[in-house]
Image (cartoon, rainbow, N blue to C red):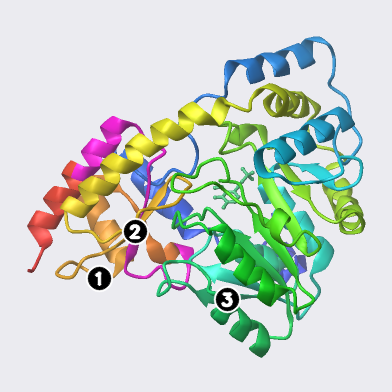
Amino acid sequence: MKSDLISLMKPSVVAIKQQDIFKFNAKAKSIPGAVNMTVGEPNFPTPDHIKKAAIAAIEENKTHYTVPEGDHELLHAVATYLHDKYDLNYDPESQILATAGVTEGVFSVFNAILQTGDEVLIPSPSFTIYGPDANFNGASPVYLDTSKTGFKMTPEALAEVLRTNPRIKILLLNYPSNPTGASYTKTELEALAEVLKKHDIFVVSDEIYSELTYNFKHVSFGTILPEQTILLNGLSKSHAMTGWRFGVVCGPADVIAQINKIHELATTSITSITQYAALEAYKNGYDDPISMRKEYQARRDVLHKGLKDLGFECPDPDGAFYLFIKIPEGLEQDDVKFANELLQEEHLAILPGSFFGIGGEGHLRLSYAASMDNINACLDKLGDFVKKHSKL
Ligand code: PLP
């Protein structure tokens, strides 16, 4: 291709850089036998009954376009599931869209709302797509460092940032959090809502890890402040369905109708076969996450204890499948350097916290969507590394 053709392309697209995480993972993959604790997806297969429903859909030729918002039998099943699990009350006929994962959900929501000069408030450290999604839509991310407050945004900090940044149009909430595992209690969410009520802004609440909570029951922001909330959820983490690409966007009917216009332009509709798999998951897969959650919890407990024994300070994570740990004194404090040396010397891949933005410096993210064997190998390798390098 002629190199000058790039100059015809949108600068905001050309400016998007390949994420550091991909580069680090490529390096880890090039080392044979390296233990990888970076993976952000379940290492369980999709439950059999869901796979069978998809196979049946293919055999019954349910392989055509659907309406853009998603098949209505599916939307009804989603509404019932969200009601039964989280007490949410969304009208399936007007308040729910089926999207190609939360990833497409964030993109379509931002695209429908943001204009040049707008700002998106993102508590940080955070999942890596939100900032680039804001930038691409002409807006700027405003990162709020939560590292001094247990990786949670306080109502005081929220009030202050909204007071000083009047162009903020969206607060992006993600809990349980990737990368920190932190989540909010009902009382904490209510305190945030008190502040948010006073402002004309949307809360885009990414609750993709809602089924993976360990310390208390998940409370959806859609029950706390429904009139301002656009809820994102899906099946990737709860039902080990990352490759199927299924998510939902829920919110006030008039807002959802506008987002559906962008979603239709981008997708026409999501894959019909995935929709039949999702229908089965929402109708008959209420209990699927339970055994996976139990297994994650067992792994989390082993990893958490092992890390504490090695001298790492790490809060008891509320949910998701990540531990976000502080590098102890006496060891290399530059997390990128630490992670690269660990990979080089011990063949153990752990992500540097600063890959997840402001507040992540001096931390490391470990995923326990990994086998117990890998968790034990990780603790051995990290133990050896700490012994070799500790200056205390
Ligand atoms: N949101 C968060 C916080 C995530 O960690 C991930 C994946 O790692 C996603 C969204 C992507 O979800 P989906 O597979 O539904 O696009």
Quadrant in which residue 352 is drawn: bottom left
* Residue at point 81%, 62% (across, down): 227
Q: Position of residue 107 (x, y in %)?
A: 73, 56
* Of callouts 3 and 2, the N-terminal one: 3
Per the model, the C-alpha gap separating discs 1 and 2 is 19 Å
Q: Which of marks 1 and 3 is in front?
A: 3
Residue depicted at 77% across the width and 15% down the height:
58
Location of residue 252 by image quarter: bottom right
Q: Estimate how packed mark 1 is, as few (under 14), some (14 to 19) or many (20 or more) residues with alpha carbons within 10 Å.
A: some
Q: Is mark 1 within 8 Å of ligand 1?
A: no
In the displayed structure, does residue 181 sit left or right of residue 240?
A: left
Q: Which residue lies furthest to the bottom in this view?
A: 164
Residue numbers of the magenta segment: 356-379
Numbered disc 1: secondary structure:
loop
Amino acid type for the residue under numbered disc 1: Gln
Query: Which mark is on residue 155?
Result: 3
Q: Is disc 2 placed on a helix, strand or loop?
A: loop
- Whole-number angstrom distance, CA of label 1 to CA of label 3: 30 Å
Q: Which amino acid does label 3 sit on?
A: Pro
Mark 2 vs ligand 1: CB below 8 Å: no
In the rendered view, tell whether residue 125 sits above or below residue 144.
Answer: above
Q: Left of 389 or right of it: where is 201?
A: right
Kindly identify the amino acid type of the residue bearing the numbered disc 2. Pro
Q: Mark 2 points at which residue?
A: 315
Label 3: element kind? helix
Q: Position of residue 157 (x, y in %)?
A: 55, 80
Q: Name the residue under label 1.
A: 333
Q: In which quarter of the image is residue 194?
A: bottom right
